[in-house]
Image: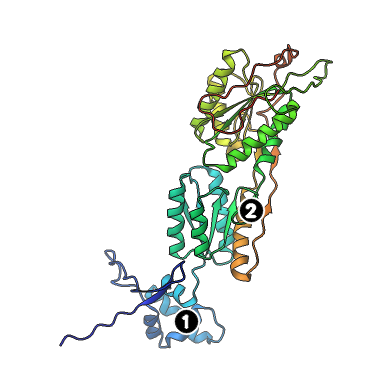
Amino acid sequence: MKPLTYVKTFSVCYGDGQMKRKSPPTEPPAAPGMPERRSRLRDVAEAAGVSVATVSRVLNKATSVSDRTRRKIEAAISDLGYTPNPVARALTHGRTRVIAAVIPTLGHSIFSRFLHAIEDELAEHGYTLVVATTRESPAVEQARTRALLEMGAEGVILSGTERDPALVALVSAFRVPAVLTSVYEPGAAFPTIGYDNAALARRAVRHLVSLGHRRIAVLHGPALRNDRTRARLAGVAAELEAAGGGRGRKGRRPAGNGHGGALPAVSAEYVEAALSEAGGCTAAARALAAGGACGARPTALLCLSDVMALGALFELQRAGLSVPGDVSVMGFDNIAWSGHAEPALTTIALPVERMGRAAASALINRLEEGAEIQPQLLPGRLVIRASTGPAPAECCAGAEETTQQGTVVAGAAEGPRALVK
């Protein structure tokens, strides 16, 4: 008769509340030169001549173990190269202490700064960060979020408020707290911790208008699946409307130019391209070509991200135009290189590090203390540098003439399109 083989199982609680029995994961085969299996808690106890419970108390930093016994156990741990099994620890304590961040891309440094801040805050409280990227795809976002939740993530950090209802249902089914970042919208599906994209875009427009710019090209990334970009575009349109004195393409606000004459109306072109340096080059070239066709080149390029502003600087240099003498350039983000570009880039500084720490802290407080996560509005700020200056003198010549109807350059997104005069 063959001897009976007993296989240990453990319980896993899924998001639907069902308990299922599963066999524990087997250890992978050892790499060449490595021990056949990892040391276990029992091995440490045997080597130190103590009970498993005593080893566990030492690992959990209990004070009820004598110094002599603690030293013996620490020596055994060192000799055996023992490390705690995270699966076993999670099963014992019912906690993984893992937070998931699901972000659009790792290709932009602004997300690197954001993740560093999250990780620093989590580490200070004994939590670990795991990261996944979505490439702006709702299907990918859902799949990656599910995978991280099934790994045992205890909280989730997401970017923006726009997402498939199925993802909201998924996170809710797992009963874990979630935070939406890079936006501030108190009525969103989950608490938001971020900034007012529309208000900051309005601040950028006001800066350019205050310098006398009346022909502004707005360069932006794809808006279809990016609510942050759309909010910025809405802010630009609202401020242009205010500057023009009315809604619609025929509105016009008479204004003094300091010399007894009237300033021309404010006009804008919206140019959509890839959210990258190359996209900035392409968008700037389109804006210059559209202006050149009617003799009304834009005097300022408002880029809704710094990476596009860098591409715009490259394209203006290729075109032989000086910044800001011929064309002013303004960005949005204040990423690391923006103050070191030539010329240094005027931009809107986003509180990225503060946002990362605030999101992590909110989740920790929820998990540790049960505190409700409250929406938080974080301030951005205008950083004026050398890339913006007064509009060229010829911009104000012939101000009595009404400027041409606004156009949307090929590739522009759905959204704010009207020229406000």
What residue is at 55 percent from the left and 25 percent from the top?
Answer: 284
Rendering coords of residue 294 (x, y %): 60, 13
- Camera-side mark, 2 or 1: 2
Total of numbered circles in the picture? 2
Rendering coords of residue 103 (x, y %): 51, 49
Q: Which quadrant would residue 198 be assigned to in this image?
A: top right
Q: In screen coordinates, is 253 left or right of 154?
A: right
Extreme residue in the left direction: 1
Give the labeled residue for mark 2.
193
Judged from the image, the secondary structure of the residue bearing numbered disc 1 is helix
Rendering coords of residue 186 (x, y %): 66, 53
Rendering coords of residue 83 (x, y %): 42, 72
**Residue 330 vs residue 159, the one in the foreground:** 159
- Is 248 above or below relative to 230? above
Label 2 neighbourhood size at 10 Å, few (<14), some (14-19), many (20+)?
Answer: many
Q: In screen coordinates, is 214 left or right of 89?
A: right
Judged from the image, the secondary structure of the residue bearing numbered disc 2 is strand
**Residue 240 vs residue 251, the one in the foreground:** 251
What residue is at 57 percent from the left and 20 percent from the top?
Answer: 288
Cβ–Cβ below 8 Å for labels 2 and 1? Answer: no
Residue type for callout 2: Ile
Quick one: label 2 or label 1, which is nearer the N terminus? 1
Q: In screen coordinates, is 322 left or right of 25?
A: right
Give the labeled residue for mark 1.
56
The answer for how far apart the CA atoms under marks 2 and 1 are is 39 Å
